[in-house]
Image (spheres, helix red, strand yellow):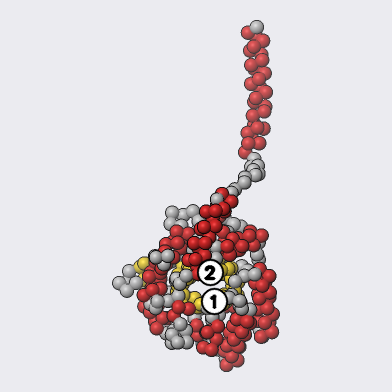
Amino acid sequence: MKAIIYNIFTCTLLLLACVLPTACSNWNEPEPVDVNINSPKDQNPELWASYMQVLNTYKQSEHYIAYTRFDNSPEKPVNEGSYLRSLPDSLDIVALCNPGNISDNDREDILLLREKSTRVIYLVDYAAQAATFTDAAALGTWRDKAVAAATELNLDGFAFTGVRLYSGTDAEMATRKEAAQLIVSKLSAATGGGKLLVFEGNPDFIESADLEKLNYIVLNTADLTNVSELNLMIAGLPDSNILPREKVLLSARIGDLIVDEKNEKQSTVPLMTDRVAAMGPLGGLAINNIGSDYYSAKMNYETTRTAIQQMNPSK
């Protein structure tokens, strides 16, 4: 009997030895798992509706504006921070940096942001592509495509960039001036019905007569390294009768440093947040680099929310 039991035990061990490597190999292979994730809206529709009402009331109230660019539709999303849905609810305006490539996720998220009263706009990055336009016709074709795409997506307006030429031939400078006028003319005509038109850059790119067509101007203060440069930039703005200060937004890049009046380096976002009220008051703050992380100890989400709360502490 003992011999029989021993043989059975031995055979069992041999069988397990043959099976386990295969089983372990199978365990190491990833398998798709269907997981039903209930959004906050699905978990408690009544509470969600109440929250949306409060959020909408805040967005419609008088407050300092929070603006950001966002690199939508990344080729390789690295985490939840790669999606529009993960942006802070209290952002007022989001400019899509990759509006010519809208994914299905983007389309869903744009609807969600609109429910949160966040304005989603199309970025026309003329400054990055100015050298590719040899004539007004080429610029017009590119501009018309942008308008058509924004219309198809039912976006809330446009942001555009531009850099004025201070040197070059008379013809080159005249071409850049004409381009600015053509862009403002076309985009402003497409922003009826409460849609937005935002310019990112130095306002000297825009003709004085066209400044009134803009809702906001995002100054390129994110590239400054010293507050003395900031003071000079604000002092050099057109008269407030021509460019009302509530249209002006400072910009800051998360993670950057700037030298303050005491010659000490400070985090740029908090410093620029303080200057929004102190230097105008101005219209608000544009926060750059918002999508570069999601899980770090000092999350960009937290930095953004803190800046918005500091600008609007009573909201």
Q: In what element is the residue under mark 1? A: strand
Q: How many marks?
A: 2
Q: Residue at x 58, y 68 (%)?
A: 120
Which residue appears farthest toward the bottom when viewing the image?
A: 170
- Point out residue 145 in the picture as x, y percentages from the top left corner: 68, 75
Q: Quadrant of the N terminus?
A: top right
Q: Which residue is mark 2?
A: 93
Res 307 visible: no
- Point out residue 203 in the picture as x, y percentages from the top left corner: 50, 83
Nearer the observer, 203 or 314: 314
The disc, 1 or 2, on the residue closer to the chain's N-terminal end is 2
* Vertical arrangement, residue 98 with respect to residue 36, above or below: below
Q: Are marks 1 and 2 in contact (CB under 8 Å)?
A: yes
Q: Residues within 10 Å of mark 2 (few under 14, many from 20)?
A: many
Report whether 92 appears left or right of 131.
left
Q: What label sits on residue 206 in the rendered view?
A: none
Nearer the observer, 28 or 102: 102
Res 242 visible: yes
Q: Residues within 10 Å of mark 1 (few under 14, many from 20)?
A: many
Q: Which residue is mark 1?
A: 198
- CA–CA distance in space, label 1 to label 2: 10 Å
- Amino acid type shown at disc 2: Ile
Q: In what element is the residue under mark 2? A: strand
* Vertical arrangement, residue 120 with respect to residue 229, above or below: above
Q: Residue at x 50, y 69 (%)?
A: 60
- Amino acid type shown at disc 1: Val
Nearer the observer, 93 or 125: 93
Which corner quadrant of the image does residue 160 belong to? bottom right
Q: Residue at x 43, y 85 (%)?
A: 240
